[in-house]
Image: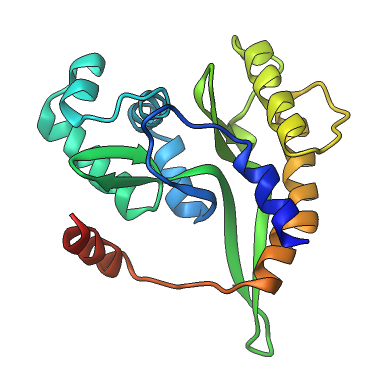
Amino acid sequence: MIQNYITRLKMLSVPKGYPEIDLIRMINYRAFESCVNNEMRCAIMSLMARGMVIASDIATTLGISRTAIYRHLHSLRRNGLVLYKDGKFYVAAKLFLVYDTLIDNDGSIRLTVHSNKGSFVDEALGVVFVKGELCKCDVCIIKDECLSAVKGLAKRLDVKIRSEKPLEAFKEIVSEIVKRDVVNIVKNGYLIVKTPEEVEEQSIVEH
């Protein structure tokens, strides 16, 4: 049964030449917001998702210095949004879900997924960022393109959506796949917790 979930998620495409990346990566909401609240970091990830994966090329396209581009890339890597391999930088997953953790009075940990926040790779837009309360679908100049991308995501994930607003439609998708796919994947698998320092050390060893 778990193979059905994985097959659906693999239908989310990435540019030709990309390495194997995560299907879904869950990002803490503070780390996610450190990206989406910075237009330059959003632009960097969108370029990567279109196949521009060399830091100097990204810097030239965006008109910023190499020092600045590496500062942004370092932050994106530490927060789990970008990975580094063989001198190139890539979006780290096809779909990012945003979570928060709460500790109940009895000491148990409760994980909450924010259905109104996240991002995914899209062929036309690069990366689509869903920013929760920051999204103003009614006045957004790319509402139609965003809605088309969200509908494409729903189709590939086999989720039926009703809303014609990108934010609401994305919330429907996240709510469904968390119940249908993510919970089952976690129940049938395992989670690995690494500190940012461990992630950096592993990257250095591998490359």
Number of numbered discs: 0
Point out the image quarter for the C terminus: bottom left
The one nearer the camera, 95 or 37, is: 95
Say whether residue 153 is left or right of residue 131.
right
The one nearer the camera, 13 or 104, is: 13
Residue at position x 58%, y 35% in the image: 131
Residue at position x 24%, y 58% in the image: 203
Say whether residue 202 is left or right of residue 135.
left
| Residue 94 appears in the figure | yes
The colour scheme applied to this rendered structure is rainbow
| Residue 139 appears in the figure | no
Query: Can you tell which quarter of the image residue 188 is in?
Result: bottom right
Query: Can you tell which quarter of the image residue 134 is in?
Result: top right
Q: Position of residue 182 (x, y in %)?
A: 69, 59
In the picture shown, does residue 168 fall above or below 98?
above
Query: Can you tell which quarter of the image residue 116 is in?
Result: top right
Point out the image quarter for the N terminus: bottom right
Q: Position of residue 115 (x, y in %)?
A: 70, 47
Say whether residue 190 is left or right of residue 72.
right
Q: Position of residue 196 (x, y in %)?
A: 31, 64
Residue at position x 31%, y 24% in the image: 52
In the picture shown, does residue 143 fall above or below 115?
above
Q: Position of residue 107 (x, y in %)?
A: 63, 88
